[in-house]
Amino acid sequence: MMSSTVMTFTDRIFLGNYSLEALSASLPASIASFLFFSFFLGVTEYIGVFVSQYTGAQRPERVGAALWQGLWFCIPAGIFLSSLWFIAEPLFMLGGHAPEVRELEIVYFRILTLGGGPALVGVTLSCFFSGRGLTRPVMLVNMAAAGINIPLDYCLINGWGPFPELGIVGAGLATVFGTMLPAICLTFMVFTKENEEAFRVRSARRFLPDLFKRFMRFGLPGGVQFFIDMFGISFFVFMVGRLGQVELAATNIAISIDTLAFLPMIGMSIAASILVGQAMGSGNPDDAAYATKSVLHIALAYMALMATLFILFPGPLLELFRTRGDAGGDFALVKESGVVLLRYVAAFTLIDAVAIVYMGGLKGAGDTRFIMRTMCLGAFGCLVIPISVMTWLGVGGVHGPWICLLVYVALLATAFMVRFRKGGWRSIRVIEH
């Protein structure tokens, strides 16, 4: 996840250096594409829980069958994501952003959605390793992807050497290539003779209705939950963009900086899911509770460090996004607003650590429907409805939406923590007996 963080963060820096319009367009377009991608991602990543529970139950022969159910799901998912090309223009017309920003948003969105299918295949294949607790291969593959993506990103955005200057189009192409590379590498790493003998990764490729139905039963709520969460965040970004280009650019930068804290915590959430899944598969819910608390301690320590950096050193972080040349004349206003927004980000990161880790623990145990219901309630009750009312009344400015975002994550953290400590998840059974 740190590799993904570095790729995303440097992508935004390069675009910010290129032009303020490209930076303003990058976050709405990438969040909108990830909004649709998130549903399928939330479903496919649940293969990791099945792999972990089969591993904990010492049933390796079922690992290949579970993996293939996720791969079968990737086919219609990739087709659907590619078809989003045709809705890009009407979608971003709803955003109400400046015409020059909207055109860049449409182009960037279309490129990113075309790469959704291969990205899902890469996520599914990575579950074969991460579900068994072997996260190092996944780390190395993604580090290699980042090592290639970052220089390619710079070359395609700015035009260097034999590469043409493509601006935000180059950023999109580099991102798609960076997501395809892990899928290619992991394909060669998973489907080996040794893995076939141990896990039946080739011979268990048949579509199994019963296993697929169980996968959908637990995975679909995870997909809906992820989609609703991203819908709330996307709505937040689009509504802030209506306040003006300075507010949109400052929010984009603040959220881009937040990825330094947020994306590694997704890795912590996955770790909690895998450890809980293995413990539940072996019939040891007490080990699952202990693992979740241990992950929470690590997450809080990391988030506290990042929150301190956001509060004490906002200037150097914001300066990374300054547009080169005369086009950066408006950056002083963006920076002034960004310093304030990073204080919101600092509070957000600490609360989000609690929400993300406990959510990972509940997912690993199979309590995905509670997560889905809580996300729906929070997204609409704390983000969509209040921000819509404030926009209609013309009150709140840029602070109102950010306060709503803090309330939203505080609700999630409280609900997930209370749910986990009550222990109802201990009786849920994900895999068949």
Image: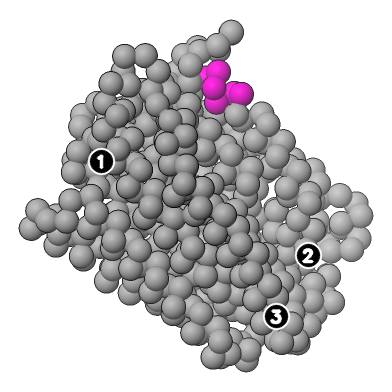
At label 2, the amino acid type is Arg
Is 299 contained in the magenta span? Answer: no
Give the mark nearer the N terminus: 3 vs 1.
1
Residue 166 found in image quarter = top left
Asked whether disc 3 touches disc 1, contact meaning CB atoms under 8 Å apart, the reply is no
Amino acid type indicated by mark 3 = Tyr
Is residue 206 at least partly visible in the picture? no
Q: Nearer the viewer, residue 384 or 94?
A: 384
Is residue 347 visible in this depiction of the protein?
yes
Which segment is the magenta one? 151-156
Residue at 78% x, 63% y: name it.
Answer: 133
Q: Vertical placement of 172 versus 210: above or below?
A: above
Q: Residue 197: percent from the left, percent from the top?
A: 91, 60
Q: How many marks?
A: 3
Q: Assess whether residue 153 is covered by the magenta stretch.
A: yes
Say if mark 2 contacts mark 1, CB within 8 Å. no
Left or right relative to 329: residue 110? right
Name the one closer to the observer, 283 or 386: 386
Marker disc for residue 132: 2
Give the side of residue 85 with respect to residue 261, left or right.
Answer: left
Q: Is residue 59 left or right of residue 416?
A: right
Q: Give the mark nearer the N terminus: 2 vs 1.
A: 2
| Amino acid type assigned to the residue bearing label 1 in the image | Glu
Cα–Cα span, label 3 and label 1: 43 Å
- Residue 304 is drawn in which quadrant? bottom right
Find disc 3 in the rendering and name its residue.
290
| Residue, disc 1 | 247
Tell me residue 250's x, y (percent).
Answer: 32, 40
Q: Which mark is residue 86?
A: none
SS under mark 2: loop
